[in-house]
Image: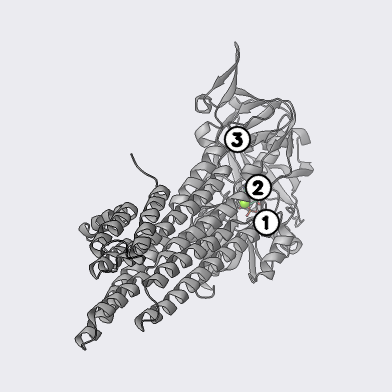
């Protein structure tokens, strides 16, 4: 049977207290004290000793368990049984406290993970059947009753209801959906029954993606750990050398050996880096937790650290600063009807997931025959070329037409325009309008107010539109008519000119800009609209596509980093003070032990403040 650490602490504490009472009342001979304290010591600390010995055998003896072992064993050897036991006892109290803190953090992140659906109600010929979500395939129809979680991504075919998406996006206002709307797995159906046609298998559905990301982020704390291992690699030997120094020199000078060995051991206890070792990863962990609660997935503590030092923010336009949901403003057809032109455009775009393509398909109410559509070729950043009825149909911007030698009339309006041509013949154009996202302007203002003064927009769209959007959201610098490769070279230029030790953030939707997302110091993807490639490439994913969350993420990062720093400064400060006192003999091992555990506890509690989200407002 394995006895929990808490129980062992309590038992050891009782034995220890008994030993203290017996010792101070002189009720037992001194020779009987050793077994009592040794029992308490082993009950509470046997696993630490085993771990320390195991580490030594592996040739890696530079951790805090090792320090604890020599300090406590040393104390026993010089006859300070009480101190030796107390060191181990309090060390374990600290460990227990750390466990609790980590678990409670994990639990709050797990609350977010309460999005995992247990079943799907599959509609079959013989009625509705409850099945494992993993068994459902694309095209299946599922039913979602009020109160149930949507198990797979799909589009509503029947019914209208409101969805609670807060677990996914942090947005508390319910979203109303009806036939034709897309729904994401992990949201909860609130009022009425919905029938949904599944569009993604479980493994590709939002809920699986989110769970995967969150799990990865918890395990990925490498750079922080690296820092600590590096720290321990120099720190621990330095401390041990220091302790030997403290003991040996005075003894050589003829001082009392016992006093100085005691002081050296105290020195070891004080220098145990527990507080730092514990509180640094915990702080980042809590920061990630806070972000997840707000619907922002940060893929690791290292990215929070990097974000805290952001000096420039670069944005994509369509889908990032603007809705990416285009309405049709005007259709100008040459030699065919407007309806036919729109239908042709929708057919040509059937192979693209660009927001323009999605919007055109949505606007075309007429059905069409997919067998007429042949292969299509993506002209990244310009449009698409699709074979329809054996003829090549081009749909895209002016650049695309020019690259194919097709002349189109002059036009510099501030509207996104899709030009169409078939086999080299110009057929007309569809003028679309997009809207700047709510919160984009406020976000840019907020970035400025927290000192990120360089904001840049990179877009593949025309100059007139680009500049219009930039001025609407207050972005200082706009570069337009860029192909994906041009976006990268602009981004690299910005990275080259950034102030030292700062980072450049790129925010995009991953459509034509996934390479930029991965090239930037920190890549942020709009998770709802964005492509899977973007979510993969990004370091931070904003689940509900709200641009305001870019500023929020940076604020979380700064606060988290600030708290982590406070802990490091505080812990090291207190340690150095006690260290100095221990060398001159003012601090004894008691103060050292209590100081160590006390500092660790305060640091842990301080780290947990990173979890609070209320200070970031509703956004
Ligand atoms: P942004 O930088 O604004 O997000 P993109 O790089 O995605 O823009 O695309 C640049 C431009 O290329 C768009 O503004 C549009 O004019 C054109 N374009 C790209 N893909 C398509 C498409 N599938 N259909 C029509 N036009 C497209
Ligand atoms: Mg885009």
Task: Give the side of residue 131 with respect to residue 59, left or right.
Answer: right
Q: Which residue is mark 3?
A: 185
> Is disc 2 surrounded by few (<14), some (14 to 19) or many (20+) residues within 10 Å?
many
**Residue 130: % across, % down:** 56, 20
**Residue depicted at x 53% and y 25%:** 137
At mark 3, the secondary structure is: loop
Q: Which residue ends up furthest to the right in the rendered image?
A: 330
Please identify the quadrant where the C terminus is shown.
bottom right
Q: Viewer-nearest of labels 1 and 3?
A: 1
> Is disc 3 surrounded by few (<14), some (14 to 19) or many (20+) residues within 10 Å?
many
Q: Viewer-nearest of labels 3 and 2?
A: 2
Lower position in the chain sequence, tag 3 or tag 2: 2
**Residue depicted at x 58% and y 50%:** 292
Residue 59 in sight: yes
Distance in Å between CA atoms under marks 3 and 2 = 15 Å
Q: Which residue is mark 2?
A: 170
Residue 489 in sight: no
At mark 2, the secondary structure is: loop
- The image quarter containing residue 378 is top right
Q: Is mark 1 within 8 Å of ligand 2?
A: no
Query: Closer to the camera, 293 or 365?
Result: 293
Q: Which residue is mark 1?
A: 614
Q: Are marks 3 and 2 in contact (CB under 8 Å)?
A: no
Query: Closer to the camera, 29 or 541?
Result: 29
**Residue 40: % across, % down:** 32, 55
């Amino acid at each position: 049977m394995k006895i929990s650490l808490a129980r062992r602490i309590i038992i050891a504490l009782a034995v220890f207290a008994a030993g203290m009472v017996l010792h101070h009342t002189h009720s037992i001979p001194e020779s009987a004290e050793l077994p009592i304290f040794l029992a308490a010591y082993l009950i509470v600390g046997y696993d630490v000793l085993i771990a320390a010995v195991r580490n030594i055998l592996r040739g890696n003896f530079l951790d805090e368990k090792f320090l604890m072992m020599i300090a406590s064993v040393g104390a026993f050897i010089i006859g300070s049984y009480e101190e030796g036991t107390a060191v181990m006892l309090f060390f374990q109290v600290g460990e227990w406290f750390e466990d609790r803190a980590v678990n409670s953090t994990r639990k709050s992140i797990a609350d977010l993970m309460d999005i995992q659906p247990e079943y799907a109600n599959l509609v079959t010929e013989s009625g509705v059947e409850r099945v494992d979500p993993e068994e459902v395939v694309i095209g299946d129809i599922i039913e979602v009753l009020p109160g149930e979680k949507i198990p797979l991504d799909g589009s509503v075919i029947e019914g209208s209801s409101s969805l609670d998406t807060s677990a996914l996006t942090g947005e508390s206002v319910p979203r109303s959906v009806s036939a034709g709307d897309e729904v994401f797995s992990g949201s909860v159906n609130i009022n009425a029954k919905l029938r949904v046609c599944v569009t993604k298998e479980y493994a590709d559905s939002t809920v699986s993606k989110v769970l995967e990301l969150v799990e990865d982020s918890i395990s990925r704390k490498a750079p922080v750990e690296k820092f600590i291992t590096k720290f321990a690699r120099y720190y621990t030997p330095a401390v041990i050398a220091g302790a030997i120094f403290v003991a040996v020199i005075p003894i050589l000078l003829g001082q009392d050996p016992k006093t100085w060995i005691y002081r050296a051991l105290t020195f070891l206890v004080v220098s145990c880096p527990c507080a730092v070792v514990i509180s640094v990863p915990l702080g980042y962990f809590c920061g990630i937790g806070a972000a997840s609660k707000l619907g922002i997935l940060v893929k690791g503590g290292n990215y929070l650290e990097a974000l805290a030092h952001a000096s420039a923010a670069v944005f994509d336009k369509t889908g990032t600063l603007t809705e990416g949901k285009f309405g049709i403003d005007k259709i100008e057809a040459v030699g065919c009807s407007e309806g036919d032109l729109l239908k042709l455009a929708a057919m040509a775009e059937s192979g693209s997931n660009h927001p323009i393509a999605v919007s055109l398909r949505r606007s075309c109410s007429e059905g069409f025959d997919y067998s007429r559509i042949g292969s299509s070729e993506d002209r990244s950043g310009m449009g698409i070329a699709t074979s329809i009825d054996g003829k090549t149909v081009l749909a895209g911007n002016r650049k695309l037409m020019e690259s194919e030698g097709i002349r189109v009339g002059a036009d510099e309006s501030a509207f996104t325009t899709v030009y169409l041509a078939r086999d080299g013949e110009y057929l007309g154009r569809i003028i679309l309008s997009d809207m700047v996202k709510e919160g984009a302007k406020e976000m840019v203002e907020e970035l400025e107010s927290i000192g990120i003064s360089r904001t840049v927009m990179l877009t593949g769209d025309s100059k007139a539109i680009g500049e219009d959007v930039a001025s609407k959201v207050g972005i200082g610098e706009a570069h337009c008519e860029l192909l994906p490769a041009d976006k990268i070279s602009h981004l690299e230029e910005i990275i080259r000119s950034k102030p030292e030790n700062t980072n450049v953030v790129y925010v995009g939707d991953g459509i034509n800009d996934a390479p930029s997302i991965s090239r930037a110091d920190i890549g942020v993807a709009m998770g709802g609209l964005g492509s899977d490639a973007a979510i993969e490439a990004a370091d931070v994913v904003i689940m509900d596509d709200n641009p305001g969350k870019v500023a929020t993420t940076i604020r979380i990062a700064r606060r988290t980093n600030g708290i982590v720093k406070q802990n490091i400064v505080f812990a090291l400060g207190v340690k150095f003070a006690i260290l100095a006192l221990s060398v001159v003999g003012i601090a004894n091992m008691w103060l050292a032990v209590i100081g160590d555990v006390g500092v660790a506890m305060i640091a842990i509690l301080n780290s947990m403040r990173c979890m609070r989200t209320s200070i970031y407002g509703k956004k």
